[in-house]
Amino acid sequence: MKFSRFYLIFSAVGLLPIALSYGVDTNRILPKLLQIHPVEGGVIHIFRAIMGLYLATIVLWLLGAIRGGGLMRTALIGEIVFMVGLVAGRILDLLVAGWPSPMLMAYAVAELVLAACGIFCLKQFDSQAAFTETLPISNSGRAV
C-alpha cells in the first residue's frame, strides 16, 4: 500500500508542471518547452481544457493516495488508463508523423514505465484485498 500511495503522489506531482504548462501563460511556455506556437484564442482554449483534465486527474490520484481503499483502486485504474492512453497516442503519432523530439520520446518511455508500475500496484492492491477478505473475523463472543 505504501508504494501505491507513493506512486500516485509521484505521478500527480510529476504531472502538475506539465498540466500547468498547457494553460498558464500558454504562448510563453509552450514555444520554449515544445516549440509549439498556439497564438489563436481557440487553440489556447483547447490547451486550457486539457490542463483542466490533467488537474482533475491529479485530484483523483491524490484523493486515492490519501483516502485509500476503493478510491485508491479507482485512482490506480485511472492512472493506468491515463498513461496507456498517452502512450497509445504517441505510438499512433510515431506511425503517422514519424519521430518526434527526443523530449517527447522520453515522455513516452516515462509514461510506459508509469503504466507498468500502475499495473504492478493494482495487482498488489487486489492481492492484498483478496487476502484480507479471507481472514476470519472474530467478534470476541459479542453479538454482532
Image: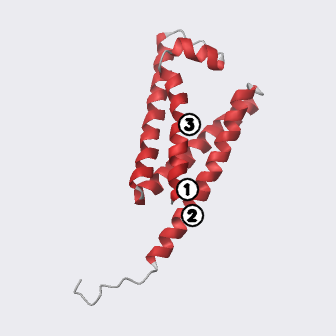
Q: Give the quarter of the image for residue 104.
A: top right
Residue 142 appearing in the image:
yes
Q: Position of residue 34 (x, y in %)?
A: 65, 20
Q: Position of residue 59 (x, y in %)?
A: 42, 41
Mark 1: secondary structure: helix
The residues bearing labels 1 and 2 have C-alpha atoms spaced at a distance of: 10 Å
Q: Give the quarter of the image for residue 112.
A: top right
The kind of residue on which mark 2 rests is Gln
Of the numbered discs 1 and 3, the one sitting upstream in the chain is 1
> Hey, which residue is sitting farthest top in the picture?
39
Mark 3: secondary structure: helix
Q: Position of residue 2 (x, y in %)?
A: 51, 57
Would you say the residues marked 1 and 3 are in contact, meaning their CB atoms lie under 8 Å apart? no
**Which mark is in front, 3 or 2?**
3
> Hey, which residue is sitting farthest left in the picture?
143
Residue 36 appearing in the image:
no
Identity of the residue drawn at 61% across and 14% down = 31
Q: Position of residue 84 (x, y in %)?
A: 61, 44
Identity of the residue drawn at 63% across and 15% down = 32
Q: Which residue is mark 1?
A: 3
**Which mark is in front, 1 or 2?**
1
Q: Give the quarter of the image for residue 89.
A: top right
Identity of the residue drawn at 55% across and 59% down = 122
Which circle marks residue 14 in the picture?
A: 3
Q: Which residue is mark 2?
A: 124
Task: Please name whichever residue, 84 or 135, is drawn nearer the observer in this view of the structure.
Answer: 135
Horizontally, residue 54 falls left or right of residue 92, namely left
Identity of the residue drawn at 49% across and 15% down = 25
Would you say the residues marked 3 and 2 are in contact, meaning their CB atoms lie under 8 Å apart? no
Quadrant where the C terminus is found in the figure:
bottom left
Task: Please name whichever residue, 78 or 124, is drawn nearer the observer in this view of the structure.
Answer: 124
Which circle marks residue 72 in the picture?
A: none
